[in-house]
Amino acid sequence: MPLQVEAKDPPLTPHVQAQLVGESRTFSPGKPVRIAVRLEAEEGWHTYWAISGDSGKPTRLEWSVPQGFVPGPMLWPAPKRIEVPPLVNYGYDDEAFLMTDLETPSDFIAESVQISVRARWLVCKESCLPGEATLSLTLMNSDGPPEPNTIWSQVFQKATSQLPQSTPTTWKAHARQVGQDWILQIENPSGFSSKKETQWTFFPLQDLVFQNAAPQSFHPSANGMEIKWAQSEYLTHAPDTLEGVLVERSGNGSTEKVQAWTVVAPLEGKISLAKMLFFALLGGILLNLMPCVFPVLALKAVSLLQKSGKLRRDILQGGLAYSAGVLFSFWIFSAVLIALRHTGDQVGWGFQLQSPGFVGSLSAIFFLLGLSLLGVLEIGSRWMGLGQSLTTKEGLRGAFATGMLSTIVATPCTAPFMGSAVGYALTQSDGDLWIIMTALAVGLALPYLLLTVWPPLLRWLPKPGAWMETLKQLLAFPLFATVIWLIWIETLLAGSFSLFYSLGALLALGWGVWFQHRWRTTWAKGCFVLLCILAGLLIAQIQRVDTPLAEGLQELSKSSVQLPWRPYHKQSIQKWREDGYSVFVNFTAAWCVTCQVNDRTTFRSPSVLAAFRDRKIIWMKADWTLPNPGITADLQSMKRSGVPVYAYYSKDLHKEIQLLPEILTPPILMEALQESETSK
Amino acid sequence: MNKLLTVGILCSLFTFPLVSHAGQAPGIKLSDENGKVHQLSDYRGKTVVLEWFNEGCPFVRKHYDSGSMQKLQKQYTDQGIVWLTISSSAKGKQGYFTADAAKASREKEKASMTAILLDSDGKVGKLYGAKTTPHLFIIGSKGEMLYQGAIDDQPSTETEDLAKAKNYVDQALQEILAHKGVSVSKTPPYGCSVKY
């Protein structure tokens, strides 16, 4: 049969010749036929792959076929990595041969069928041009075996051989997250070629997971391959699997051999949710011992002693109301975190201390709490559910409020367990984040709840007596100490002038407390309320300012003169390592007490200084006192959301980043360094 | 009194995660199409939009040929927002601007930006990490970075996609003018590569 299936000349489009071609000239009804859109770009120009990379746009095909014909998914042969510094794209720099298997109806009787497609692409060299063509192809109906299309059959063969295959069942792929990199491991019993002329490339099938422009490193070996590639800066949370196409190229020109596999690697090294829940629970329990929470809870427990004569049911109700208060506040916090995360914002635990207004309000709350413990502020103690009947509704509400109060006063005290739990939670799905935060809340509520559920535990507490009043008053002082610390942070954030406002607010509060303590009348209470409002207005005046803050920070860094800290600069870490230096990064903040303690006890120790010098370790300090999205993102990529974090990059480039314990002493630090050098 | 304190606590719980933790935008010193030098610090107290521009890029063309970018510029410069369009194309590459070419382009596009800044050595573009044209940044009145990323959520060159697009810059500017927080502050940019 004389046929002219490619009768029409390809339409003229700038820089690209587009054609629709078939693997065969004929088709048998009911059997699929492979057809392809061929885009031949001029030298130097390229079109894009299914994932275009940092810029560009994938080629799109819209088919128009008669009824009964069904075009399958687009089959993309292995692409190339096209570097346009500072970007990297994925595409085809010579010929894009985009195939599809067309299903044909078995009841087709006409002599031929016309298939057409509207192809739209973007073709780029230095500049880009969108292109579009409507292409068509006529295929003849034939009962016999398909008549091969001799012009194109070789091209079809070659393109088909370059389609990504599914990985053989003997292969095992898994991925893990190390620092800011993904590590993809593919186990293959028959091994991968590590010959020099073999070129390996990995193409992501997911957008915004990998940092396209970052270099990929391949370590093929006899039983597998390890691929290391940086994460995308737009990654919001880790996917369950890493997906991409692994391409092996060897030879060039006509002898070029290309093989491609679709790799789906489940993400491992994610700490199991159960383990994380355990740590979250433990972290919550530990929070009870923190200096900011303990006084509040100690008083609650003591007040239970006084109520030991009461009905068990009433005590239990109080405990449940308290737990509900804790849960409620944590849930509000989680909801806000989730909402913020969906806007692409960078958030972390402890960041609330980056707001001077919040710090100011917190210092006022602690001040009032302290006064109420000293017994001069009646309202405060009533509010904390002390000295009143647990059976009244008021009592339950008080218990609920105490729960919320515990959560708020806990915010400045990040227990080490809690930091990593929240950090982990932030990299998880919304549901998991919610569960982890709930576990934290349960942990915080648990000790007190246990006391109310099982009053015999109360026997472990000392007998009530006059000492209780003494203890209560004594506990005011840790709270006042917290006020000092908070105000110091505030001056760093808002400059020394903010002292006028915050101390003025405390004066107003103190004066108001005096009114209501001296005259227990309604007007005295009115004065108290007015002065509280005045305090609030004063605190509202506190705003973050740039210059004094910078000065404050400079003073801070001056106070650590002997330390050769360099400012944190992520990009230079690799450079130092290549030059044979190890790098130690100290993620810290002025408001982080643990950081300050480590700074004074460990980083100034002469033995540590000497060890760092001997080991050629570069010190870097990443200061998170002020909001810094870059540092927040880097912390998150290490699964941390708060400071301190101590990261050690060995000069041995094969070694992965090591995270050191949050609480350091010189021996712990030296041991950790020793370990990271000797471990593999 | 109990109630008052409870309300206070609730408020503080709600506000603390809403702290702006934006970074500061890097400084800019560039001359415009009339030879006037603009510095970012000149615009303290105002909201500034930076728009990376290459008049030949089809992704940019989508927004100019349809008139949607000009409309956005007009709408917000009328409300006191500073709109700086920046060309970082190197000499000899697509989208490179001399002062005269920039003047002509402004007229041709009937555009209403505050100024077209010439950054042919790409210094400012690299400082900001401008990757594509268009790539937009919004800087708040205190110099803080409020938005960076794409103009909208339709990475294409076709004008018909504008109808279904959600314009991130429009949304962010509306929120800023209404003294609300910017709900979407970072998106991956799309377009042609900046021709450094």
Image (spheres, rainbow, N blue to C red):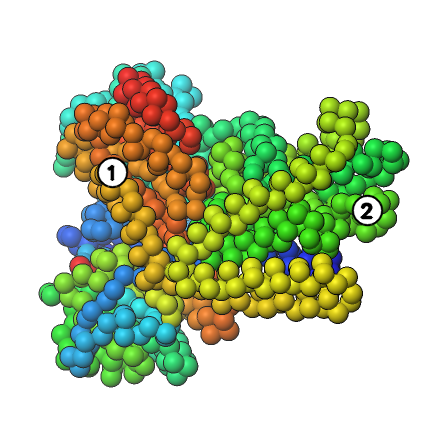
Q: Is B109 left or right of A580, judged from the image as shown? A: right
The one of A55 and A412 positioned closer to us in this rendering? A412
The residue where tag 1 is placed is A563
Label 2 Cα crowd, 10 Å radius (few <14 / some 14-19 / many 20+): some
Seen from the viewer's position, the closer of residues A488 and B89 is A488
Q: Quadrant of the C terminus of chain A?
A: top left
Left or right, A408 with reference to A119: right
At horizontal 42% and vertical 32% (from top left) the residue drawn is A662
- Residue in the foreground of this view, choosing between A616 and B150: A616
Q: Secondary structure at mark 1?
A: loop
Q: Chain of mark 1?
A: A
Which of the labelled discs sits on residue B15, or is there none? none
Q: Which quadrant of the figure contains the N terminus of chain A?
A: top left
Q: Chain of mark 2?
A: A
- Tag 2–tag 1 contact (CB < 8 Å): no
Can you see residue A156? no
Coordinates of residue A663 in the picture (x, y in percent): 42, 30
Residue type at mark 1? Leu
| Residue A399: quadrant of the picture | top right
Whether residue A664 sits left or right of residue A228 in the image: it is right
Q: Earlier in the sequence, mark 2 or mark 1?
A: 2
**For the residues carrying marks 2 and 1, which lies nearer the camera in this image?**
2
- Examine the rendering and report whether any part of residue A622 can be seen: yes
Which of A273/A47 is in front? A273
Q: Secondary structure at mark 2?
A: loop
Q: Residue at x 76, y 33 (%)?
A: A465
Q: Are marks 2 and 1 on the same chain?
A: yes
Residue with the most extreme left position: B92
Q: Which residue is mark 2?
A: A388
Image position, residue A388 (x, y; %): 82, 46
